[in-house]
Image (tube, grey):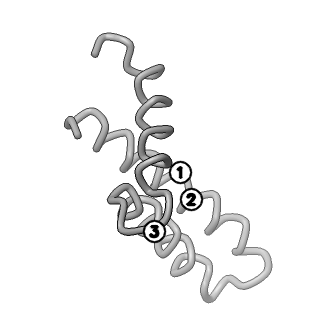
Amino acid sequence: MSFAYQVLDILAAGVLAGITAFGLSAVAPAVATDVGVLFAGLYYFSRNPWGGNGDEVNEAIDDAYDTLLPGR
């Protein structure tokens, strides 16, 4: 995985954390940030295929990144 892919992973995880925290802040403000960080960590670390169809998921994410990074 290239550095650019890792940067996109971190940005996607951050956006996921922000959306989750913002959405939960109206309902459960005490745990909104914790759940957002949990979801971001789950996304970031799920890029390693530990089971199931992880290889297919990673390939789909890499294909999406290839469209964002056409110079690679």
Residue at the spot of label 3: 42
Q: CA distance from mark 2 to mark 3?
A: 14 Å
Residue at the spot of label 1: 15
Quarter of the view holding residue 4: top left
Q: Is residue 64 above or below residue 59?
A: above
Q: Is residue 2 above or below residue 48?
A: above
Q: 45 left or right of 34?
A: left
Q: Amino acid at mark 3?
A: Leu
Spot occupied by residue 44 in the image (x, y as percentages of width and height): 39, 59
Q: Are marks 1 and 2 in contact (CB under 8 Å)?
A: yes
Considering every residue shown, the one lying at the far bottom of the view is 30
Q: Secondary structure at mark 3?
A: helix
Q: Which of 47 and 17 lies nearest the eye of the viewer?
A: 47
Q: Which of 55 and 29 lies nearest the eye of the viewer?
A: 55
Spot occupied by residue 21 in the image (x, y as percentages of width and height): 61, 68
Q: How many residues crowd mark 2 within 10 Å: few (<14), some (14–19), many (20+)?
A: some
Considering every residue shown, the one lying at the far top of the view is 71
Q: 15 left or right of 10?
A: right
Q: CA distance from mark 1 to mark 2?
A: 5 Å
Q: Is residue 55 above or below residue 63?
A: below
Going 46% across and 55% down the picture, which residue do you hit?
Answer: 13
- Counting residues from the start of the chain, the first of labels 2 and 3 encountered is 2
Q: Amino acid at mark 1?
A: Val
Spot occupied by residue 16 in the image (x, y as percentages of width and height): 56, 56
Q: Quadrant of the C terminus?
A: top left
Q: Is residue 8 above or below residue 40?
A: above
Residue at the spot of label 2: 18
Q: Secondary structure at mark 2?
A: helix
Q: Secondary structure at mark 1?
A: helix
Going 62% across and 88% down the picture, which residue do you hit?
Answer: 30
* Numbered tag placed on residue 58 in the rendering: none
